[in-house]
Image (spheres, rainbow, N blue to C red):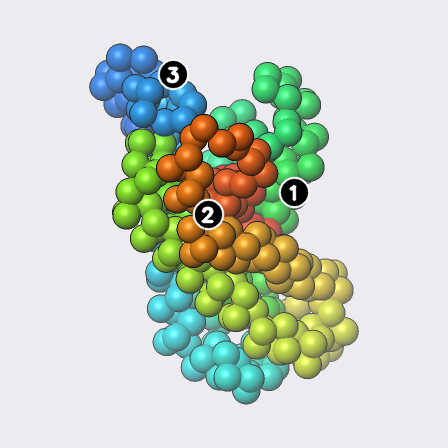
């Protein structure tokens, strides 16, 4: 184990707890501020949004986007700066992605931020947006057992449990950084949400943010997945043994198959993102806005629909939010 002893685990826990407190503070700071600033806390944008937005939702989205702005760009920079990750992106990473001479410092530094964020996100589960087709006023249990809720809760818990072991045992820790880099696209996803909620969905700013979201999603989550998938299939970490990687716990190699799940999810979401972008390029969105007398197509809301479906950090590839 690269970081042996209780001190490393204590430092990891302390860092995660500190970031947890940081994100909870942001939530309550925004929540309280909006209570003073808004005439109706249940309609923060005073009728400018398509439907009322509560201050709890805005507070949740606020600490989500703060997390994404911090972690997403830094993770991308870390991948470019790390020679092992950089080699993998041109199909030369090999077994260095499983373990190299030094622990992935970027994973060690950035993962606690996201673990703290995921823990904070979970305690505000009741504020999470409902997916399309969900009951308008579900009970807590009904909401918890919605398919999207199960997926996101599983993602959060799996990430919070597995990432510290990946880092402290230095096994597949660099793949954690790739997952954190996905949050760069979530910055633009949430930007779109704020722009739309504020009543500027028809603005050029909304279209520009949507374009950056689509572009970043395709580059980071889809194109960037190809060398990762090739490397995983070539090294097959799930077939490695603790004899080959001293310090790795017995359950870790077999459980590494979950590294494939983010690529499955991103491929599914990616199809929806690309389809929505194509419709916008063809001018379908503008036509619908200019012709309100026509019967609206309930299935056509590409960017808004994608925002709801991909807005949660992505499972071990999961934020919630492609954030919550």
Q: In the picture, residue 246 is in which quadrant?
A: bottom right
Give SS at disc 3.
loop
Give SS at disc 1.
helix
| Spot occupied by residue 142 in the image (x, y as percentages of width and height) | 68, 23
Give SS at disc 2.
helix
Q: In the picture, residue 263 is in which quadrant?
A: bottom right
Q: CA distance from mark 2 to mark 1?
A: 32 Å
From the viewer's perspective, tell me whether residue 173 is left or right of residue 83.
right
From the viewer's perspective, tell me whether residue 315 is left or right of residue 304.
right
| Spot occupied by residue 233 in the image (x, y as percentages of width and height) | 69, 76
Residue depicted at 30% across the width and 19% down the height: 46
The answer to whether residue 157 is seen in the rendering is no
Q: Give whichever of 150, 215 is nearer the camera.
A: 215
Q: Nearer the viewer, mark 1 or mark 3?
A: 3
The answer to whether residue 201 is seen in the rendering is yes
Q: Hey, which residue is sitting farthest top in the picture?
A: 39
From the viewer's perspective, tell me whether residue 271 is left or right of residue 188.
right
Q: Residues within 10 Å of mark 3 (few under 14, many from 20)?
A: some
Res 67 label: none
- On screen, residue 7 above or below 236: above
Residue at the spot of label 3: 42
Work out which quarter of the rendered image holds the N terminus and state it. Answer: bottom right
Residue depicted at 37% across the width and 37% down the height: 290
Res 151 label: 1
């Amino acid at each position: 184990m690269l970081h042996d002893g209780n001190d490393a685990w204590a430092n990891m826990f302390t860092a995660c707890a500190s970031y947890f407190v940081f994100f909870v503070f942001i939530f309550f700071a925004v929540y309280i501020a909006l209570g003073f600033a808004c005439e109706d806390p249940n309609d923060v944008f005073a009728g400018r949004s398509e439907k009322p937005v509560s201050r709890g939702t805005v507070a949740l989205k606020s600490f989500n986007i703060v997390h994404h702005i911090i972690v997403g760009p830094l993770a991308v920079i870390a991948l470019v700066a790390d020679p092992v990750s950089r080699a993998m992106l041109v199909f030369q990473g090999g077994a260095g992605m499983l373990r190299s001479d030094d622990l992935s410092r970027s994973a060690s530094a950035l993962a606690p931020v996201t673990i703290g964020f995921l823990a904070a996100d979970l305690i505000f589960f009741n504020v999470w947006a409902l997916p399309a087709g969900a009951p308008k006023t579900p009970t807590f249990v009904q909401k918890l057992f919605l398919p999207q809720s199960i997926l996101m809760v599983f993602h959060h818990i799996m990430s919070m449990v597995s990432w510290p072991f990946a880092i402290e045992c230095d096994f597949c820790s660099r793949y954690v950084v790739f997952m954190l880099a996905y949050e760069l696209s979530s910055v633009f996803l949430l930007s779109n949400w704020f722009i739309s909620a504020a009543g500027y969905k028809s603005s050029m700013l909304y279209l520009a943010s949507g374009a950056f979201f689509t572009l970043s999603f395709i580059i980071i989550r889809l194109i960037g997945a190809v060398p990762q998938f090739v490397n995983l299939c070539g090294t097959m970490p799930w077939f490695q043994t603790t004899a080959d990687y001293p310090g790795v716990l017995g359950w870790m190699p077999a459980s590494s198959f979950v590294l494939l799940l983010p690529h499955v999810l991103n491929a599914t979401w990616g199809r929806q993102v690309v389809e929505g972008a194509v419709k916008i390029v063809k001018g379908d969105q503008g036509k619908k806005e200019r012709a309100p007398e026509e019967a609206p197509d309930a299935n056509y809301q590409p960017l808004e629909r994608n925002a709801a479906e991909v807005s949660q950090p992505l499972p071990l590839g999961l934020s919630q939010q492609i954030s919550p």
